[in-house]
Amino acid sequence: MTDRLSAEEIMSALRDLDGWEAMPEREAIQKTFKFKSFNQAFAFMTRVALKAEKMDHHPEWFNVYSRVDVTLATHDVDGLSHKDIELADFMNKIIA
């Protein structure tokens, strides 16, 4: 079973996740990724999709040309879990 993170755990995780922010209207985190082209954005989404499928944890995202807006939350716990932090960290690492 996946456990919901405490407010303290969320704040601690956000300090280590460059560019990720807590959403004010719900317990979720978000980040916008900008790329040089649509192909780069799509390649990023493809890599994330493969990881997300293995984790059985899928992002909410929106893509327009070279921009990808990502929101992460764990619907099973109605908030954030370690899965969100792991996937956010993966996204940051593959663009570094």
Image (cartoon, rainbow, N blue to C red):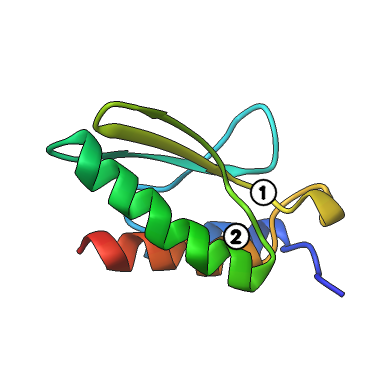
Q: Amino acid at mark 1?
A: Ala
Q: Is residue 48 above or below residue 30?
A: below
Q: Amino acid at mark 2?
A: Asp
Could one spot residue 14 in this view of the protein?
no
User: Label 1 neighbourhood size at 10 Å, few (<14), some (14-19), many (20+)?
Assistant: many
Q: Earlier in the sequence, mark 2 or mark 1?
A: 1
Residue 39, by quadrant, is top left
Looking at the image, residue 29 sits to the left or right of residue 15; the answer is: right
Q: Determine the residue positioned at 73% across, 62% down.
A: 6
Looking at the image, residue 95 sits to the left or right of residue 84; the answer is: left
Residue 42, by quadrant, is top left
Could one spot residue 75 in this view of the protein?
yes
Q: Determine the residue positioned at 85% across, 55% down.
A: 76
Q: Nearer the viewer, residue 68 or 79?
A: 68
Q: Which residue is mark 1?
A: 73
Q: Which residue is mark 2?
A: 84
Distance CA(mark 2)–CA(mark 1) = 6 Å
Of the 4 image quadrants, the one containing the C terminus is bottom left
Looking at the image, residue 39 sits to the left or right of residue 16; the answer is: left
Q: Secondary structure at mark 1?
A: loop
x and y, in percent, of residue 78 in the image = 82, 47
x and y, in percent, of residue 10 in the image = 60, 59
Q: Determine the residue positioned at 23% across, 35% down.
A: 38
x and y, in percent, of residue 45 in the image = 40, 50
User: Label 2 neighbourhood size at 10 Å, few (<14), some (14-19), many (20+)?
Assistant: many
- Name the residue furthest left: 36
Q: Secondary structure at mark 2?
A: helix
Circle 2/circle 1 CB separation < 8 Å = yes
